[in-house]
Image: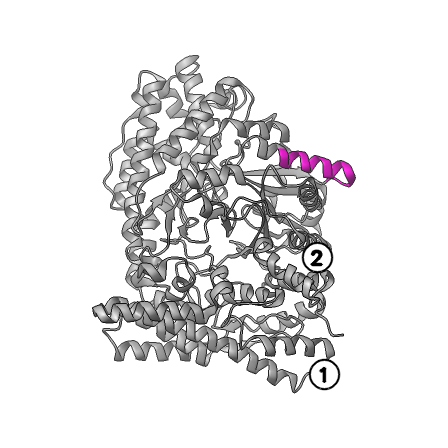
Amino acid sequence: MSRFVFDREKMFGQFRKVFETYPTDISGLYQKLDIMQAENPQASAFQKKAWIYRMAARDCKVRLMPACPFYMELDTGRDRNSITSTWPPEPGLATWLMAQNKQLLHDYNETWLANYDKALMIGGVMFADFAHHYADVERVLEFGLEGLKAQALSKLAEVQERKEQGRIAFYESMICGLDSVMQIAERFADEAERLLKVTEDPQERYHLEQIAATARRIPRQPAQTFYEALCTVCFIREMHNALEGIGFAVYGHLDRILWPYYQKDIAAGRLDREQAQALIDCFMAITDARWDLNRELPGGTNATVIIGGCDAEGKSVYNTVTEMLIISMEKHRFANPKLQARIRDDHPSEYLEKLADLAKSGTNVLSVFNDKAIIASQIKAGKREADARLYLAGGCQEPTLSCELNSRAYVYLNMAHMMDVSLFPEKWEQIFAAAGDMVHFMPAYRAESFEVFYRRAMYNFGVQIQNFVHKYNQLALQWPETNPCPLYSAVMADCIQNELDVTEGGARYNSDSFGMTGLGTVIDSLFAIKKAVYDLKIVTMQELRTALACDFEGYEPLRQYLRNRIAKMGHPDPEIREFTQQCMADIARHINGYPNTRGGYFESSLFTFYSFEWFRNSNASANGRKRGEYLSRGGNPSEHAGGIDAATLLYAQNVVDYTDYPGGGVLYMDLPVTKGQLGRDLFVSVIRGFVQNGGSIMDFNVIDRAQLRKAQEDPDNHRNIVVRVCGYSALFHSLDKEKQDEIIARTQR
């Protein structure tokens, strides 16, 4: 009997042979599009997007790797290490329309953003999130692309009757996108049949036979089997990555999605667990096989798989598919995709034990999500409970809903410098003015009491948030013309019925968030000002400002006092715990609720990616941090906060109301490698403690300091060590020495 088989060496070799030729030359296709644009100067952005869909379906090569039973690779001229797009546009057919907007590129990246980037106030180059989305495969599994096309045709008839040309172009482009994707799938069937004529390997022939028999129906029609469902998940994500000019990081909530198909196949005798595991292994291997992981990955691959949690009715999800996904990551030690494990109080101990085994193994691909906190945060943000229960996590760890266009990981704000504004307002007003933003800040440093200082500092924080919200709202208005996404809109719940593209606000929910960097640094600095300047009067405000301005040169005793004698965020001291609680609530209050251009709202987020390193040369801060030292990461205490072990760090979470942070609050848990039952018990306790203390999201980084030192000295013999850089995982040897040193330094606490 022929069976699916995962042959890692053969599969990776075939992928490497294909992708080492990337990026391929598509200049001829660009020239054709340029000619079409010249001949049709009045064409709308929707019509231009349809040109891209048709050209991709007709002219771009489909590629099959017979050791892999899935079909997904369309050569659109992308780089090998690119399944996502960013702004400025990366190479590829799908980004042609974005690349036409040279004025926006200049005005945003080279003029406005350049000023704030130089001042280390803003990190990131995108004016909206072009990299971390989810193409709702569940709608494709339910309706098939033919079913979605029928819905679009019905709405097209309505707008044609109303003679609304803009909406007519929208639906025509959407239908063109759906037709193009179905045509591409048929071309994969053709390619499989061609390869069967020249392929003798029996295992490869079996895979090709399955593709040839499946690709003409899937995803045109709803999936019926476990294999067809996996084909749909893989194909839909990759087609969106290839055709929409933005990135689709999220595979989806796979154990919940795939479980009914698995049960049905097992009952019918079409599948056994061994076969299902082979399919899961092939599926989970695709990202690592596609990418060259030996190159440094500044943003990671972004690929994520969600497990656990609950369904729309609130029933816990844990099943055989959950186990197979965990087994695949632990057995094969893939660096990608990231496994996002949702945790509930009623999950069985077996689930936590399997996650603990994965965590302690040092694969460093696991993030833990506290369902109670995250679902409550989404409901507090105005989302339906049933929708919130189905939340996902995209790119790194940022929560999103399947029916939400969440622009959530594109701008990172330096909270340390936002605090510095209150100490040196005149200097910062000039920096803002250079960017064309005329704002005025209160001179908080002149306050006679800390209460007044704090209120002014929070006011100044709010002024900056409002300024940045205003600017990014202006920029977001250009998204529909820069790169509408009607194919994405076809699979996004509500867009077809709302008659709006996702970029126009067609999704059920539309959120934005700024990543806030340096939370612990800022809370420690505010508390240091409270204690040293106002309560104990160790130093005057003017002396402190002078010390900060000269990076503590000549003020080393003061720096040591601020650094070592004043309690820090994360310490169990009641006063700093109460102060942390107040600051966290006030920060969230100043961010949550600003309207965006798509009918949604800005949400607070403590997701920082690697911006804590980008901003390391920020001005000295009042907690004793000198310029060049790292800012705090996510929701973590500052690196200067000594005496904080894992238990203390977990206890510190219960002072924060993370339901105020729908964009997520990430705790980075760095632990040493442990083995055996003791290691399992430790990690189960850490996971339980995190949930019980009300945390939001936790990343594991389990590392052996001595081993990493050896890997620095002898990288050729340590090429399989995976570390969590921040929101993404990477091979340690592929990182530059500065990143390697930063990761090693995390073990010093």
Residue 615 locus on image (x, y percent) = 45, 41
Q: Residue furthest top?
A: 536
Residue tagged 1: 200
Q: Nearer the viewer, residue 151 or 430?
A: 151
Q: Secondary structure at mark 2?
A: helix
Image coords of residue 704 (percent x, y):
70, 42
Task: Decide: few, some or many residues near mark 2? Use Cα within 10 Å; few <14, some 14-19, many ≥20.
Answer: few
Query: Which label is found at residue 332?
Result: 2
Q: Is residue 151 above or below residue 653?
A: below
Residue 477 occupies quadrant: bottom left
Q: Residue at x 58, y 40 (%)?
A: 344
Residue 440 sits in which quadrant? top left
Q: Earlier in the sequence, mark 2 or mark 1?
A: 1
Please name the residue shown 58% across and 70% down the image.
19
Mark number displayed over residue 607: none
Residue 678, horizontal then vertical, whole percent = 76, 36
Q: Does residue 415 show up magenta in the picture?
A: no
* Extreme residue toward the left, this view: 163
174 to the left or right of 161: right
Q: Quadrant of residue 699?
A: top right
User: Which three-letter amino acid code belongs to the residue tagged 1?
Assistant: Glu
**Kind of residue indicated by mark 2:** His
Rendered view: 504 above or below 121:
below
Q: Quadrant of the N terminus?
A: bottom right
Residue 358 in the image, given as x and y percentages of width and height? 69, 47
Mark yes or no: residue 680 visible: yes
The secondary structure making up most of the magenta span is helix
161 or 44, which is in the foreground?
161
Residue drawn at 77 percent across, 38 percent down = 677
- The magenta stretch is 674-688
Considering the numbered disc 1 on the image, is that residue within a helix, a strand or a loop? loop
The type of colouring in the image is: one colour
